[in-house]
Amino acid sequence: MKTLIKDVYVVKPDGTTPLTNIMLDGDKIAAIGDVPEDFRPGKVIDGKNHLATPGFVNAHTHASMTLLRSYADDMALMDWLNNMIWPIEAKMNEDDIYWGAMLAMVEMVRSGTTTFADMYGPYMNRVAEAAMDAGIRGVLCRGIIGVAPDGEQKLQENVELYKDYHGANNGKITVMFGPHAPYTCPPEFLKKVAKAAQDLGAGIHIHMHETKTEVEDSLKQYGKRPFAWVEETGIFDNDHVLAAHCVHLDDNDIAIIKKHKIAVAHNPGSNMKLASGFAPVPRLLKEGVVTALGTDGASSNNNLDMLEEVNLAAMLHKVNEYDPLAVPAFEALKMGTEYGAQAVNIEGLGRLEAGYKADITLWNMNSAAWFPRNNLVSLLVYAANAGSVDTVICGGQVIMEKNELKTLDEERICYEAQRCADRLKK
Ligand SMILES: CSC[C@H]1O[C@@H](n2cnc3c(O)ncnc32)[C@H](O)[C@@H]1O
Ligand SMILES: [Zn+2]
Protein backbone atom coordinates (compact mmCIF):
# COMPACT_ATOMS: atom_id res chain seq x y z
CA MET A 1 0.00 0.00 0.00
CA LYS A 2 1.27 3.46 -0.93
CA THR A 3 0.73 6.47 1.31
CA LEU A 4 1.42 10.12 0.63
CA ILE A 5 2.03 12.67 3.38
CA LYS A 6 1.45 15.89 1.52
CA ASP A 7 2.78 19.41 2.17
CA VAL A 8 4.62 18.60 5.36
CA TYR A 9 7.72 20.08 7.00
CA VAL A 10 10.29 17.29 7.29
CA VAL A 11 13.20 17.08 9.73
CA LYS A 12 15.93 15.79 7.41
CA PRO A 13 19.03 13.94 8.64
CA ASP A 14 21.07 17.15 8.25
CA GLY A 15 18.71 19.11 10.52
CA THR A 16 17.04 21.16 7.77
CA THR A 17 13.24 21.26 7.70
CA PRO A 18 12.00 21.77 4.12
CA LEU A 19 8.31 21.90 3.19
CA THR A 20 7.86 18.83 0.99
CA ASN A 21 6.07 15.46 0.61
CA ILE A 22 6.82 12.00 2.01
CA MET A 23 5.96 8.98 -0.12
CA LEU A 24 5.60 5.63 1.62
CA ASP A 25 5.57 2.25 -0.06
CA GLY A 26 4.69 -0.61 2.27
CA ASP A 27 6.77 -0.34 5.42
CA LYS A 28 9.41 2.00 3.96
CA ILE A 29 9.90 5.59 2.93
CA ALA A 30 9.97 5.45 -0.89
CA ALA A 31 10.97 9.07 -1.46
CA ILE A 32 10.85 12.57 -0.05
CA GLY A 33 10.28 15.43 -2.48
CA ASP A 34 8.11 16.24 -5.47
CA VAL A 35 5.49 13.60 -6.15
CA PRO A 36 5.94 11.91 -9.54
CA GLU A 37 2.82 11.47 -11.64
CA ASP A 38 3.03 7.69 -11.48
CA PHE A 39 2.98 7.61 -7.67
CA ARG A 40 -0.62 6.63 -6.93
CA PRO A 41 -1.24 6.55 -3.20
CA GLY A 42 -4.04 4.51 -1.64
CA LYS A 43 -4.05 6.98 1.23
CA VAL A 44 -3.23 10.69 1.46
CA ILE A 45 -2.46 12.39 4.77
CA ASP A 46 -2.69 16.16 4.75
CA GLY A 47 0.55 17.36 6.32
CA LYS A 48 -0.25 21.09 6.21
CA ASN A 49 1.09 22.89 9.29
CA HIS A 50 2.62 19.66 10.53
CA LEU A 51 6.23 18.70 11.20
CA ALA A 52 7.41 15.15 10.48
CA THR A 53 10.13 13.59 12.63
CA PRO A 54 11.29 9.99 12.88
CA GLY A 55 9.28 8.16 15.56
CA PHE A 56 11.07 8.27 18.90
CA VAL A 57 13.10 5.28 20.06
CA ASN A 58 12.77 4.81 23.81
CA ALA A 59 16.04 2.95 24.37
CA HIS A 60 15.38 1.89 27.96
CA THR A 61 12.10 1.31 29.69
CA HIS A 62 10.04 -1.15 31.73
CA ALA A 63 6.63 -0.79 30.05
CA SER A 64 4.48 -2.71 32.51
CA MET A 65 5.75 -0.50 35.34
CA THR A 66 3.10 2.02 34.32
CA LEU A 67 0.99 0.11 36.88
CA LEU A 68 3.37 1.38 39.57
CA ARG A 69 3.24 5.04 38.52
CA SER A 70 2.81 7.29 41.58
CA TYR A 71 3.09 4.24 43.84
CA ALA A 72 6.54 5.04 45.31
CA ASP A 73 8.16 8.43 44.81
CA ASP A 74 10.95 10.54 46.24
CA MET A 75 13.19 7.64 47.16
CA ALA A 76 16.73 6.60 46.15
CA LEU A 77 17.18 3.63 43.82
CA MET A 78 17.97 0.75 46.19
CA ASP A 79 15.52 1.83 48.89
CA TRP A 80 12.85 2.20 46.16
CA LEU A 81 13.61 -1.20 44.59
CA ASN A 82 14.11 -3.22 47.80
CA ASN A 83 11.32 -1.79 49.90
CA MET A 84 8.59 -0.78 47.46
CA ILE A 85 9.05 -2.03 43.89
CA TRP A 86 10.34 -5.59 44.17
CA PRO A 87 7.76 -6.62 46.81
CA ILE A 88 4.82 -5.48 44.64
CA GLU A 89 6.35 -6.77 41.38
CA ALA A 90 6.51 -10.22 43.01
CA LYS A 91 2.68 -10.15 43.05
CA MET A 92 2.26 -9.32 39.35
CA ASN A 93 0.55 -11.89 37.17
CA GLU A 94 0.45 -12.07 33.38
CA ASP A 95 -2.73 -10.02 33.23
CA ASP A 96 -0.92 -7.19 35.05
CA ILE A 97 2.03 -7.42 32.68
CA TYR A 98 -0.26 -7.18 29.66
CA TRP A 99 -2.47 -4.31 30.83
CA GLY A 100 0.49 -2.40 32.26
CA ALA A 101 2.21 -2.75 28.89
CA MET A 102 -0.99 -1.72 27.06
CA LEU A 103 -1.19 1.43 29.18
CA ALA A 104 2.40 2.09 28.16
CA MET A 105 1.45 1.56 24.50
CA VAL A 106 -1.21 4.29 24.69
CA GLU A 107 1.18 6.68 26.39
CA MET A 108 4.06 5.94 24.03
CA VAL A 109 1.99 6.28 20.86
CA ARG A 110 0.36 9.48 22.10
CA SER A 111 3.80 10.95 22.73
CA GLY A 112 5.29 9.92 19.38
CA THR A 113 7.30 6.80 20.27
CA THR A 114 7.36 3.99 17.71
CA THR A 115 10.11 1.77 19.19
CA PHE A 116 10.77 0.81 22.80
CA ALA A 117 13.53 -1.30 24.37
CA ASP A 118 11.97 -3.11 27.29
CA MET A 119 13.27 -5.16 30.20
CA TYR A 120 10.87 -6.73 32.66
CA GLY A 121 10.21 -9.89 34.63
CA PRO A 122 8.13 -12.97 33.81
CA TYR A 123 5.51 -13.06 31.03
CA MET A 124 7.48 -10.94 28.54
CA ASN A 125 5.39 -12.79 25.94
CA ARG A 126 2.51 -10.56 27.12
CA VAL A 127 4.61 -7.43 26.49
CA ALA A 128 5.31 -8.79 23.01
CA GLU A 129 1.58 -9.29 22.57
CA ALA A 130 0.87 -5.71 23.69
CA ALA A 131 3.45 -4.31 21.26
CA MET A 132 2.00 -6.40 18.43
CA ASP A 133 -1.55 -5.30 19.33
CA ALA A 134 -0.41 -1.68 19.24
CA GLY A 135 1.65 -2.13 16.05
CA ILE A 136 4.84 -0.55 17.38
CA ARG A 137 8.38 -1.95 17.59
CA GLY A 138 9.47 -3.72 20.75
CA VAL A 139 13.05 -4.69 21.54
CA LEU A 140 12.37 -7.02 24.41
CA CYS A 141 14.37 -8.90 27.01
CA ARG A 142 13.53 -10.98 30.04
CA GLY A 143 15.04 -9.06 32.96
CA ILE A 144 17.15 -11.60 34.84
CA ILE A 145 18.12 -11.39 38.47
CA GLY A 146 20.76 -14.09 38.38
CA VAL A 147 20.71 -15.61 41.82
CA ALA A 148 19.29 -18.80 43.35
CA PRO A 149 16.76 -20.29 43.39
CA ASP A 150 15.48 -19.33 39.94
CA GLY A 151 18.24 -17.46 38.05
CA GLU A 152 18.74 -20.37 35.65
CA GLN A 153 15.01 -20.58 34.95
CA LYS A 154 14.88 -16.87 34.13
CA LEU A 155 17.77 -17.31 31.72
CA GLN A 156 15.89 -20.16 30.07
CA GLU A 157 12.80 -17.92 29.78
CA ASN A 158 14.94 -15.37 27.91
CA VAL A 159 16.09 -18.14 25.55
CA GLU A 160 12.43 -19.12 24.94
CA LEU A 161 11.44 -15.48 24.42
CA TYR A 162 14.15 -15.20 21.77
CA LYS A 163 13.09 -18.38 20.00
CA ASP A 164 9.40 -17.47 20.09
CA TYR A 165 9.49 -13.78 19.23
CA HIS A 166 12.75 -12.61 17.64
CA GLY A 167 11.67 -11.22 14.26
CA ALA A 168 7.93 -11.56 15.00
CA ASN A 169 5.32 -9.24 13.51
CA ASN A 170 7.31 -8.61 10.32
CA GLY A 171 10.41 -7.84 12.31
CA LYS A 172 8.71 -5.30 14.59
CA ILE A 173 9.64 -7.45 17.59
CA THR A 174 13.26 -8.28 18.34
CA VAL A 175 14.72 -9.92 21.44
CA MET A 176 17.86 -9.32 23.48
CA PHE A 177 19.11 -10.84 26.75
CA GLY A 178 18.46 -8.89 29.94
CA PRO A 179 20.83 -9.54 32.84
CA HIS A 180 19.43 -6.89 35.17
CA ALA A 181 22.62 -5.38 36.63
CA PRO A 182 26.06 -6.26 38.01
CA TYR A 183 24.68 -6.06 41.57
CA THR A 184 21.99 -8.67 40.83
CA CYS A 185 24.01 -11.00 38.58
CA PRO A 186 27.25 -12.52 39.92
CA PRO A 187 30.21 -13.09 37.54
CA GLU A 188 29.68 -16.83 37.05
CA PHE A 189 26.05 -16.21 36.11
CA LEU A 190 26.93 -13.43 33.67
CA LYS A 191 29.28 -15.87 31.92
CA LYS A 192 26.30 -18.18 31.33
CA VAL A 193 24.18 -15.30 29.99
CA ALA A 194 27.01 -14.24 27.68
CA LYS A 195 27.26 -17.78 26.29
CA ALA A 196 23.49 -18.22 25.85
CA ALA A 197 23.21 -14.89 24.03
CA GLN A 198 26.26 -15.60 21.86
CA ASP A 199 24.89 -19.00 20.86
CA LEU A 200 21.78 -17.26 19.51
CA GLY A 201 23.54 -14.16 18.15
CA ALA A 202 21.46 -12.01 20.50
CA GLY A 203 22.35 -8.66 22.05
CA ILE A 204 22.55 -7.73 25.74
CA HIS A 205 20.56 -5.05 27.58
CA ILE A 206 21.84 -4.30 31.11
CA HIS A 207 21.74 -1.55 33.76
CA MET A 208 25.31 -0.28 34.41
CA HIS A 209 26.80 2.21 36.86
CA GLU A 210 23.53 3.83 37.80
CA THR A 211 24.49 5.01 41.29
CA LYS A 212 27.62 5.90 43.22
CA THR A 213 26.71 3.14 45.71
CA GLU A 214 26.72 0.54 42.92
CA VAL A 215 30.31 1.43 42.04
CA GLU A 216 31.46 1.67 45.70
CA ASP A 217 29.85 -1.67 46.63
CA SER A 218 31.48 -3.33 43.62
CA LEU A 219 34.90 -2.00 44.65
CA LYS A 220 34.35 -3.46 48.13
CA GLN A 221 33.04 -6.82 46.86
CA TYR A 222 35.22 -7.43 43.78
CA GLY A 223 38.04 -4.92 44.14
CA LYS A 224 36.98 -3.58 40.74
CA ARG A 225 34.40 -1.23 39.26
CA PRO A 226 31.45 -3.01 37.57
CA PHE A 227 32.55 -2.22 33.99
CA ALA A 228 35.98 -3.75 34.73
CA TRP A 229 34.79 -7.08 36.14
CA VAL A 230 31.73 -7.46 33.89
CA GLU A 231 34.11 -7.14 30.91
CA GLU A 232 35.90 -10.28 32.17
CA THR A 233 32.66 -12.31 32.02
CA GLY A 234 32.44 -11.97 28.22
CA ILE A 235 29.11 -10.11 28.35
CA PHE A 236 30.58 -7.24 26.33
CA ASP A 237 31.90 -9.61 23.66
CA ASN A 238 28.35 -10.01 22.38
CA ASP A 239 27.64 -8.45 19.02
CA HIS A 240 25.54 -5.76 20.51
CA VAL A 241 25.37 -4.35 24.04
CA LEU A 242 23.01 -1.67 25.34
CA ALA A 243 23.94 -0.28 28.76
CA ALA A 244 21.32 1.79 30.55
CA HIS A 245 22.32 4.75 32.73
CA CYS A 246 26.18 4.78 32.76
CA VAL A 247 26.05 7.66 35.21
CA HIS A 248 29.27 7.21 37.15
CA LEU A 249 32.10 6.60 34.68
CA ASP A 250 35.85 7.03 34.90
CA ASP A 251 38.32 7.05 32.00
CA ASN A 252 38.75 3.27 32.09
CA ASP A 253 34.97 2.67 32.04
CA ILE A 254 34.72 4.88 28.94
CA ALA A 255 37.63 3.02 27.35
CA ILE A 256 35.73 -0.28 27.90
CA ILE A 257 32.54 1.22 26.44
CA LYS A 258 34.46 2.34 23.35
CA LYS A 259 36.44 -0.88 22.98
CA HIS A 260 33.27 -3.00 22.88
CA LYS A 261 31.18 -0.39 20.99
CA ILE A 262 28.63 -0.47 23.81
CA ALA A 263 25.63 1.81 23.25
CA VAL A 264 24.48 3.90 26.20
CA ALA A 265 20.87 4.71 27.09
CA HIS A 266 20.82 8.00 28.99
CA ASN A 267 17.76 8.38 31.25
CA PRO A 268 17.87 11.96 32.51
CA GLY A 269 14.36 12.07 34.02
CA SER A 270 14.71 8.87 36.02
CA ASN A 271 18.28 9.68 37.09
CA MET A 272 17.18 13.06 38.40
CA LYS A 273 14.12 11.72 40.21
CA LEU A 274 16.04 8.88 41.89
CA ALA A 275 18.83 11.38 42.69
CA SER A 276 21.37 9.11 40.99
CA GLY A 277 23.36 11.76 39.08
CA PHE A 278 23.63 11.82 35.29
CA ALA A 279 25.75 10.36 32.54
CA PRO A 280 28.66 12.38 31.06
CA VAL A 281 26.75 12.71 27.79
CA PRO A 282 28.75 15.49 26.07
CA ARG A 283 31.98 13.50 26.58
CA LEU A 284 30.36 10.24 25.40
CA LEU A 285 29.07 11.95 22.27
CA LYS A 286 32.44 13.58 21.63
CA GLU A 287 34.18 10.21 21.97
CA GLY A 288 31.83 8.65 19.40
CA VAL A 289 29.79 6.49 21.79
CA VAL A 290 26.25 5.81 20.51
CA THR A 291 24.27 7.66 23.17
CA ALA A 292 20.50 7.25 23.07
CA LEU A 293 17.66 8.24 25.38
CA GLY A 294 15.26 6.30 27.56
CA THR A 295 12.54 7.14 30.01
CA ASP A 296 13.22 4.15 32.30
CA GLY A 297 9.97 2.94 33.92
CA ALA A 298 6.94 5.10 34.65
CA SER A 299 7.51 4.58 38.34
CA SER A 300 10.83 6.43 38.35
CA ASN A 301 10.18 9.05 35.65
CA ASN A 302 7.05 9.23 35.97
CA ASN A 303 5.94 9.19 32.34
CA LEU A 304 7.04 7.69 29.03
CA ASP A 305 7.28 10.99 27.18
CA MET A 306 10.42 10.96 25.02
CA LEU A 307 10.14 14.62 24.01
CA GLU A 308 10.60 15.44 27.68
CA GLU A 309 13.79 13.34 27.74
CA VAL A 310 15.03 15.08 24.58
CA ASN A 311 14.41 18.43 26.26
CA LEU A 312 16.09 17.31 29.50
CA ALA A 313 19.13 16.00 27.60
CA ALA A 314 19.48 19.34 25.86
CA MET A 315 19.04 21.37 29.06
CA LEU A 316 20.74 19.36 31.81
CA HIS A 317 24.19 19.16 30.26
CA LYS A 318 24.23 22.86 29.38
CA VAL A 319 23.72 23.88 32.97
CA ASN A 320 26.12 21.25 34.30
CA GLU A 321 28.93 22.29 31.97
CA TYR A 322 28.10 26.02 31.79
CA ASP A 323 28.15 25.42 28.04
CA PRO A 324 25.10 26.17 25.86
CA LEU A 325 26.55 23.90 23.18
CA ALA A 326 27.03 20.89 25.50
CA VAL A 327 24.08 19.10 23.84
CA PRO A 328 22.55 21.25 21.06
CA ALA A 329 18.85 20.86 20.20
CA PHE A 330 19.32 18.78 17.04
CA GLU A 331 21.85 16.50 18.73
CA ALA A 332 19.32 15.86 21.53
CA LEU A 333 16.66 15.06 18.93
CA LYS A 334 19.03 12.61 17.23
CA MET A 335 19.64 10.94 20.58
CA GLY A 336 15.90 10.27 20.74
CA THR A 337 15.69 9.02 17.14
CA GLU A 338 18.71 8.11 15.00
CA TYR A 339 21.09 7.19 17.84
CA GLY A 340 18.23 5.32 19.54
CA ALA A 341 17.82 3.19 16.41
CA GLN A 342 21.55 2.39 16.47
CA ALA A 343 21.39 1.63 20.20
CA VAL A 344 18.65 -0.96 19.72
CA ASN A 345 20.41 -2.38 16.66
CA ILE A 346 17.67 -1.89 14.08
CA GLU A 347 19.01 -1.07 10.66
CA GLY A 348 17.30 1.49 8.45
CA LEU A 349 15.50 3.15 11.36
CA GLY A 350 15.60 6.62 12.90
CA ARG A 351 15.94 8.93 9.89
CA LEU A 352 13.50 10.39 7.42
CA GLU A 353 15.23 9.32 4.23
CA ALA A 354 14.36 7.16 1.23
CA GLY A 355 14.82 3.46 2.02
CA TYR A 356 14.37 3.95 5.77
CA LYS A 357 11.53 2.39 7.71
CA ALA A 358 8.31 4.39 7.61
CA ASP A 359 8.27 5.18 11.35
CA ILE A 360 7.05 8.76 11.45
CA THR A 361 5.53 11.15 13.98
CA LEU A 362 3.57 14.17 12.73
CA TRP A 363 3.46 17.16 15.07
CA ASN A 364 0.55 19.57 14.76
CA MET A 365 2.01 23.08 14.71
CA ASN A 366 -1.34 24.88 15.05
CA SER A 367 -0.77 26.07 18.60
CA ALA A 368 0.90 29.06 20.20
CA ALA A 369 4.08 27.21 21.23
CA TRP A 370 4.86 26.71 17.52
CA PHE A 371 4.91 30.46 16.71
CA PRO A 372 6.78 32.31 15.44
CA ARG A 373 8.29 29.72 13.13
CA ASN A 374 11.93 30.78 13.27
CA ASN A 375 13.41 27.31 13.71
CA LEU A 376 11.24 24.18 13.77
CA VAL A 377 13.77 21.92 15.53
CA SER A 378 14.18 24.52 18.26
CA LEU A 379 10.39 24.83 18.61
CA LEU A 380 10.07 21.06 18.97
CA VAL A 381 12.88 20.58 21.48
CA TYR A 382 12.49 23.72 23.60
CA ALA A 383 8.89 24.93 23.26
CA ALA A 384 6.47 22.16 22.30
CA ASN A 385 5.14 19.24 24.30
CA ALA A 386 3.73 15.81 23.52
CA GLY A 387 0.23 17.30 23.22
CA SER A 388 1.24 18.31 19.69
CA VAL A 389 1.62 14.69 18.53
CA ASP A 390 -1.10 14.28 15.94
CA THR A 391 -0.35 11.24 13.75
CA VAL A 392 1.93 8.26 14.33
CA ILE A 393 3.02 5.73 11.70
CA CYS A 394 5.08 2.62 12.38
CA GLY A 395 6.36 0.48 9.51
CA GLY A 396 3.84 2.18 7.23
CA GLN A 397 0.95 1.29 9.55
CA VAL A 398 -1.05 4.27 10.80
CA ILE A 399 -1.25 3.80 14.58
CA MET A 400 -2.79 7.18 15.38
CA GLU A 401 -4.33 9.71 12.99
CA LYS A 402 -5.44 13.18 14.02
CA ASN A 403 -5.23 12.11 17.68
CA GLU A 404 -7.42 9.07 17.11
CA LEU A 405 -5.83 5.79 18.18
CA LYS A 406 -6.35 3.18 15.47
CA THR A 407 -5.14 0.04 17.24
CA LEU A 408 -5.75 0.74 20.93
CA ASP A 409 -8.95 1.08 22.96
CA GLU A 410 -7.79 3.73 25.41
CA GLU A 411 -10.89 3.72 27.62
CA ARG A 412 -10.77 -0.05 28.11
CA ILE A 413 -7.01 0.00 28.69
CA CYS A 414 -7.25 2.68 31.40
CA TYR A 415 -10.06 0.72 33.07
CA GLU A 416 -8.11 -2.56 33.05
CA ALA A 417 -4.90 -0.89 34.22
CA GLN A 418 -6.71 0.65 37.18
CA ARG A 419 -8.29 -2.73 37.99
CA CYS A 420 -4.86 -4.42 37.98
CA ALA A 421 -3.24 -1.67 40.05
CA ASP A 422 -6.07 -1.81 42.63
CA ARG A 423 -5.68 -5.58 42.99
CA LEU A 424 -1.89 -5.35 43.36
CA LYS A 425 -2.19 -2.88 46.24
CA LYS A 426 -4.57 -5.11 48.24
C1 LIG B 1 14.30 -7.91 36.52
S1 LIG B 1 13.21 -7.07 35.47
C2 LIG B 1 13.78 -5.39 35.46
C3 LIG B 1 13.80 -4.81 36.83
O1 LIG B 1 14.36 -3.53 36.77
C4 LIG B 1 13.75 -2.77 37.76
N1 LIG B 1 14.04 -1.36 37.56
C5 LIG B 1 13.24 -0.38 37.18
N2 LIG B 1 13.91 0.78 37.13
C6 LIG B 1 15.17 0.49 37.47
C7 LIG B 1 16.33 1.25 37.61
O2 LIG B 1 16.36 2.56 37.38
N3 LIG B 1 17.47 0.65 37.98
C8 LIG B 1 17.48 -0.67 38.24
N4 LIG B 1 16.40 -1.45 38.15
C9 LIG B 1 15.26 -0.86 37.78
C10 LIG B 1 12.31 -3.13 37.63
O3 LIG B 1 11.58 -2.71 38.73
C11 LIG B 1 12.42 -4.62 37.44
O4 LIG B 1 12.40 -5.27 38.67
ZN1 LIG C 1 15.76 0.56 34.10
Image (cartoon, helix red, strand yellow):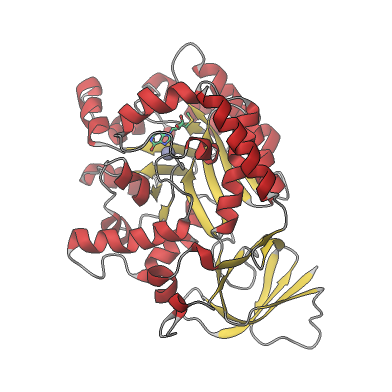
Which residue: 69% across, 52% down? 135
Which quadrant holds residue 84?
top left
**Ligand 2 image position (quadrant):** top left
Whole-percent x, y for residue 303 in the image: 46, 49
- Would residue 227 be found to the left or right of residue 346 on screen? left
Eyeballing the image, is 53 above or below 204? below
Can residue 68 be seen? yes
Q: Quadrant of the N terminus?
A: bottom right
Mark count: 0
Can residue 175 be seen? no
Whole-percent x, y for residue 378 in the image: 39, 75
Eyeballing the image, is 11 above or below 106? below
- Would residue 94 be found to the left or right of residue 386 on screen? right
Which residue: 64% across, 27% down? 94
- Would residue 224 be found to the left or right of residue 391 on screen? left
Residue furthest top as drawn: 149
Residue furthest left as drawn: 322
